[in-house]
Image (cartoon, rainbow, N blue to C red):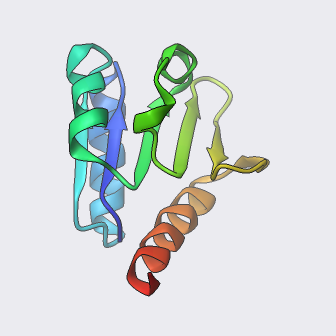
Amino acid sequence: MPRVLVISSETLSSQGLKALLERSGASEVLTASEDALGAWALAELSPEVLIVDRTYFEGIECADHLPSTIIVLCPGAEQLAVYSRQEMPMATVDNLLRAIRSCGNRKEDG
């Protein structure tokens, strides 16, 4: 599976996602808070998949560092929005895992 970066202001959420993804076979899941550390991690760690809170995603200004797969958490709505540089509908946790795995498969094929 590809390198995943989780940027969230909620430590419980980011650690929970990290544990879920690692149990599902993700080899490298990194977490960062929604401050300068998050911006640094996004620019320097070059993740293939970015998982962010909706509020942080709306504030991202520099698209140059964005990976091809972005998963946006929508707190309270119990939904995820998955963006793979194309239009995609709201998603479930199964969609989250599928999107991350497919990104890893594309990396291995290329």
Quarter of the figure that contains the N terminus: bottom left
Please give the name of the residue rendered at 28% of the width and 34% of the height, measured from the top-left corner. 43
**Residue placed most toward the observer, 107 or 102:** 107
Residue that lies at the very extreme toward the front in this rendered image: 64
* Location of residue 55 with respect to 72 vertically, above or below: above
Q: Quadrant of residue 6?
A: top left
In this picture, residue 19 sits left or right of residue 62 = left
In this picture, residue 108 sits left or right of residue 18 = right
* Location of residue 11 with respect to 91 vertically, above or below: above
In this picture, residue 37 sits left or right of residue 106 = left
Please give the name of the residue rendered at 29% of the width and 49% of the height, measured from the top-left corner. 18
In this picture, residue 28 sits left or right of residue 59 = left
Residue 64, given in percent of the width and then of the height, sits at 45, 35
* Location of residue 22 with respect to 81 vertically, above or below: below
Residue 47, given in percent of the width and then of the height, sits at 33, 50
Please give the name of the residue rendered at 49% of the width and 67% of the height, measured from the top-left corner. 103
**Residue placed most toward the observer, 97 or 59:** 59
Q: Quadrant of residue 50?
A: top left
Residue 51, given in percent of the width and then of the height, sits at 45, 40
Q: Quadrant of residue 39?
A: top left
